[in-house]
Image (cartoon, grey):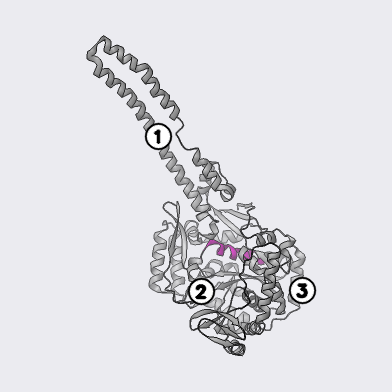
Amino acid sequence: MNVECLTLPLANRLAQEYQQGNDSALQFFAYNPHEMQAYKERLEWLRSRTIPHREQLAEGLYTYNKKIGNKQEALSQIELLRRPDTYVVIGGQQAGVLTGPLYTIHKAIHLIQTAKKLSQELDQTVVPVFWIAGEDHDIDEIDHVYWLADRETRLHKERMNLNKKGRVSASSLPLDEEACEQFLAQFFNGQIETEETASIRELVETTAAASENVAEWFARLMAQLFGKHGLILVESSLPFVRELESPVFQQVIEKNEQVADLLLKAADRIATADYPLQLQVEEHQANLFLYEGTDRLLLERHGDRFVNRRASYSREDLLKLAAEHPERFSANVVTRGLMQEHLFPSLAFIGGPGEVAYWAYYREIFELFDMRMPIVLTRMSITLMEGAKQRLLEGFGLSVEDVLTRFGQWKEEWTLQQEPHPLHEQFTKARESIQSTYLPLVEEVVRLDGGLRNLAEKNAEILLAQVAFLEDRLVRSLQQQDDVAYTRLQRIEAFLLPEGGLQERKLSFLPFANKYGLGLVDRLVEAPFTHDGTHQIFYV
């Protein structure tokens, strides 16, 4: 199985230096992810704590995963969670339609591989958990999918009409049958029919038909893709999750000012270390959302009151609500990690570069709640590389690394070399030669026989016209070759650098599955990827 590793800089400098093991970045985290001793220390800390809700957690996970059609392998992993010596590697993503961008798939692969690796290295039971952020109300971020169109020369974006109203969460957004049918019709119209298309169509249609909302559709798709590899799925708005989170909601309300103060101090330390600030931190932030009907509204703290755009609450009001109706509450980017840590015996958390930079703010907040930040790992980054695209690269003498690191510069240099055509000077000299040698001959012919003037002049015009005709045919031929070359460059760019970014941030998995089959997931899970921060090129 062909996997190539490239060193590419991360967009976020703090995450980049954390991945490199620089002390300036490591200081914001509880553990050094590059040292095996850190994993042993984390295990010892987890063993020192009891999780009184383990049985309730496992029961809720089992019921949910059974409902969404997860495989027996995943259900067996949930059974292992009932034991006090089972730990988790956790990470998650928004519930994008048709699984969203490729990095969602890559995160699931990283979770599965890391759980297996740590189980072997530590001789412990470690299971992978994928946290579906189904409560996010940024519907514009999840309602679309990208694929390559026009002979794969450009990126096409297809948006699904989710009939968004207000600030409703994905887990509360009904999956409209007609809108879903129209969206899937557009998706499959944009794909080349292959022997795999029927199975892809059956997968997305059957999972959609069984789903009540967008988040559930995502969960069912992920269960079908990764369930047999033991991936446990959990969705943030599930009633049993809310019930188990109730004590943490109450603590966040009680310690709200302290949380805000710690965030401000963390921001100062990050800025002092000369890193860009990933979070906008303000003193009045309550770091919780509250549902008012179906709308998920951000809470702010002003004096002794907690307010959103519709209502105002005292601290006592919120504490009572959190105890009696925890389903009304929802974590934000700051408190979500606390919820995960409270719910699960988390050995490690896997996040993208942006998430890693967020977590640099949280170390002291975990400690405030008598918790310890888990080991934080940067999500594996992957580019899928096809043989046809590899041959296009070879035709230009390019490598994948060239495209991912310096394509803009290379393309500019290549374009400058295309004009004018290489024989332009020779054709100019040929015309000049004809005029300087043949035209005097015409004059001599006319002097000897005036009746041949028209014929002689016409003959000279024909000679010049033939030279022009040959040059024109050459130019057209070269232009046609250039058009082919430009088209090939468009295909390379759209595939490897869609809209100037990495493939995994735009393209979706299912168009690849339509070409190579759903078994591509299994090949990726079993691929010998390295988890050392390098960018992985997987040759499909």
Secondary element type, mark 1: helix
Nearest to the observer: residue 202 or residue 19 = 19
Determine whether, in the image, residue 491 is placed left or right of residue 126.
Answer: left
Q: Which mark is residue 475?
A: 1
Between 176 and 24, which is closer to the camera in this rendering? 24
| Secondary structure state at the residue bearing disc 3 | helix
Queried whether the magenta region covers residue 194, the answer comes back as: no
* Residue drawn at x 28%, y 17% as measured from the top left: 456
Q: Which residues are magenta?
A: 100-115
Earlier-in-chain disc, 2 versus 3: 3
178 vs 238, left or right, is left
Q: Main secondary structure of the magenta part?
A: helix
Q: Is residue 107 magenta?
A: yes
Can residue 163 be seen at all in this image of the molecule? yes
The front one of 314 and 166 is: 314
Amino acid identity at mark 3: Glu
Q: CA distance from mark 3 to mark 1?
A: 74 Å
- Tell me residue 512's x, y (percent): 50, 58
Q: Which residue is mark 2?
A: 137
Which mark is drawn over residue 44?
3
Give, as a three-letter code, the residue at label 2.
Answer: His
As drawn, which residue projects farthest toward the top? 448
Q: Nearer the viewer, mark 2 or mark 3?
A: 2
Q: Secondary structure at mark 2?
A: loop
Q: Residues within 10 Å of mark 3 (few under 14, many from 20)?
A: few
Label 1 crowd (10 A; few <14 / some 14-19 / many >=20) = some
| Label 1 with label 2: CB-CB less than 8 Å | no
Q: Amino acid at mark 1?
A: Val
Tell me if mark 2 has few (under 14), some (14-19) or many (20+) residues whose alpha carbon lies within 10 angstroms of its own. Answer: many
